[in-house]
Amino acid sequence: MTPGRWARGVAALTAAAAWAALVLQLVLIVDQFRGDGQPVALALWRYLGFFTILTNMLVALVATAMAVRPASPMAGARWRFVAAVSIALVGIAYSLLLRWVWDPQGWQAVADHALHDVTPPLFLLAWLLFPHGAIGWNDLWRALAWPAGYFAYAMIRGAADGWYAYHFLDASALPAWALAINVAGLLAGVTVLASLLILLDRRMRVRTP
């Protein structure tokens, strides 16, 4: 089924918001590092260490494909599903675990809200407006693969340079049992989110003429 103009329009808006937020955050972190006398390469390395950034990149790519080439593989149901679950996790985890940790000001606050509060609902709306019925329970592992892959990536990075993007994944500060509980809790949350979207997708398939 071909998505309608509204669906593609919301996807285009989502892509524009995500790309703009990503560029703004990159400019801010590069400016911060240069102001501290540190190289741009280190700023880029730090920038790519955040699950929020990587997931917004995924959303920007998928939303762009949804808007420009909805029949392409990148705009397919499975990529839309993975992106929807992952960006929902970004918004929920930030509100529950990170919003109280810091108080961004100025342009940093703009970037922060755009990445955590704007792109998640926009992409979920685009996901809702696109056709449904092409994912099932055998796709559950796909939703888990993205955050699980990030965890492995974050642990490798942290072992290399001692920096962890999130306090609840800081292997240098947490005992192994606490880290394991945090990871298990996050993956359980992803499983719940993915299951809800699969159920919603199946229900919307039934209602789609």
Image: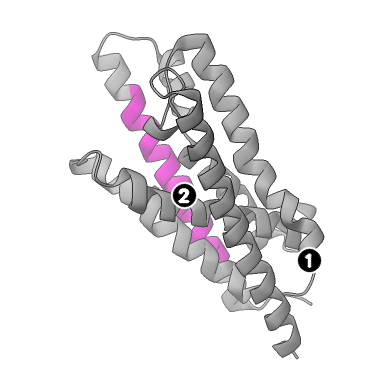
Q: Position of residue 139 (x, y in %)?
A: 77, 57
Relative horizontal placement of residue 36, taking residue 27 as reference (left or right)? left
The residue that disc 1 covers is 136
Query: In the rendered view, would you say 126 is above or below 42?
Result: below
**Residue farthest along the front direction in this orientation:** 177
Q: Position of residue 145 (x, y in %)?
A: 69, 43
Asked whether residue 52 appears in the rendered view, the answer is yes
Pointer 2 local density, CA inside 10 Å: few below 14, some 14–19, many at least 20? many
| Amino acid on which disc 1 is placed | Gly
SS assignment at label 1: loop
Q: Position of residue 174 (x, y in %)?
A: 41, 24
What colour scheme has been applied to the protein in the rendered image? Answer: one colour
Residue depicted at x 71% and y 58%: 75
Query: In the rendered view, would you say 177 is above or below 109?
Result: above
Report the magenta stretch's main SS.
helix
The residue that disc 2 covers is 90
Q: Which residues are magenta?
A: 11-30
